[in-house]
Image: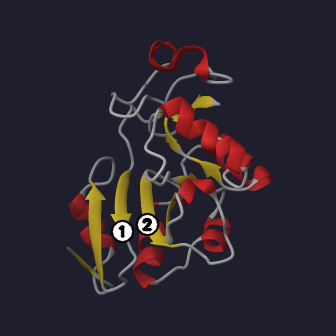
């Protein structure tokens, strides 16, 4: 399903459903070895799928719900096609109450942008239709809340020194301030 999120249009499916996850890879034309981010309904749910550290706790407290994706070690018991066989998972709690409720009720959701791989992110249902066409099972036609700025992605796998992998909605200086006395930003 393609629907507006708090950042851009997203392709969502129940992350624990491997067939649904594979469908997202197919629709998007995404490299099957590349992991997909996940939406969690709450910090508590995110803790069930990822191993947390002090840096991740500080960033989640400062920016969740919101446009910050954290890369963390995947909990060994949590399995999802979206992890692409890796030991880490990228997770965020979006600032969209409907998506948080879906994730709370159904479990974590894939949270990748609703566009063909390598193409610009979509901000409207019409843009999704132009890129994906009938390959999406459903396209929800509603506005994107945040003006189309994708989330910032921060690798928190090393607690003492985090790395910004993609700086977008949350600027580096805000991350540095949130981690003061906790971790450095490399």
Is residue 71 shown above or below 143? below
Q: In terms of depth relative to the viewer, which is nearer, 92 or 51? A: 51
Q: Which residue appears at 66% of the width and 52% of the height?
A: 15
> Is residue 74 positioned above or below 115 on the image?
below
The residue located at (49%, 67%) in the rendering is 86
Viewer-nearest residue: 97 or 160:
160
- Label 1 CA crowd tier, 10 Å (few <14, some 14–19, many 20+): many
* Viewport quadrant of the C terminus: bottom left
Q: Nearer the viewer, residue 94 or 139?
A: 139
Coordinates of residue 177 in the picture (x, y in percent): 27, 71
Contact flag, marks 2 and 1 (Cβ < 8 Å): yes
Crowdedness of circle 2 by 10 Å Cα count: few (<14), some, many (20+)? many
Numbered mark located on residue 155 in the image: 1
Q: Is residue 132 above or below residue 34?
A: above
Coordinates of residue 101 in the picture (x, y in percent): 72, 48
Residue 14 seen? no
Quarter-of-image position of residue 83: bottom right
Query: Does residue 36 appear in this view?
Result: yes
User: To which residue does mark 2 refer?
Assistant: 71
Of the numbered discs 2 and 1, the one sitting upstream in the chain is: 2
Q: Residue at x 69, y 50 (%)?
A: 18
Q: Quadrant of residue 70?
A: bottom left
* 35 sits left or right of 135 in the view: left
Give the residue drawn at x 36%, y 68%.
Answer: 155
Position in image of residue 120 (x %, y %):
33, 28
Tell me the element at label 2: strand
Label 2, label 1: how far apart the Cα atoms are = 5 Å
Q: Position of residue 124 (x, y in %)?
A: 47, 20
Count of marks, rendered view: 2
Secondary element at image label 1: strand
């Amino acid at each position: 399903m393609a629907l507006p999120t708090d950042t851009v249009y997203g392709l969502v499916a129940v992350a624990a459903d491997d067939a649904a996850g594979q469908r997202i890879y197919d629709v998007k034309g995404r490299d099957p070895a590349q992991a997909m981010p996940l939406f969690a309904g709450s910090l508590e749910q995110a803790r069930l799928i990822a191993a947390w550290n002090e840096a991740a706790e500080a960033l989640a407290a400062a920016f969740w719900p919101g446009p910050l994706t954290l890369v963390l070690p995947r909990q060994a018991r949590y399995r999802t096609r979206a992890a692409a066989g890796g030991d880490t998972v990228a997770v965020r709690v979006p600032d969209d109450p409907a998506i948080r409720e879906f994730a709370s009720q159904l479990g974590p959701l894939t949270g990748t942008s609703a566009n063909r791989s390598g193409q610009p992110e979509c901000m409207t249902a019409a843009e999704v239709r132009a890129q994906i066409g009938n390959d999406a099972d459903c396209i929800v036609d509603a506005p994107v809340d945040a003006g189309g700025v994708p989330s910032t992605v921060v690798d928190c796998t090393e607690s003492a020194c985090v790395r910004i992998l993609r700086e977008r909605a949350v600027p580096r200086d805000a991350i540095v301030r949130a981690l003061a006395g906790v971790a450095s930003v490399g």
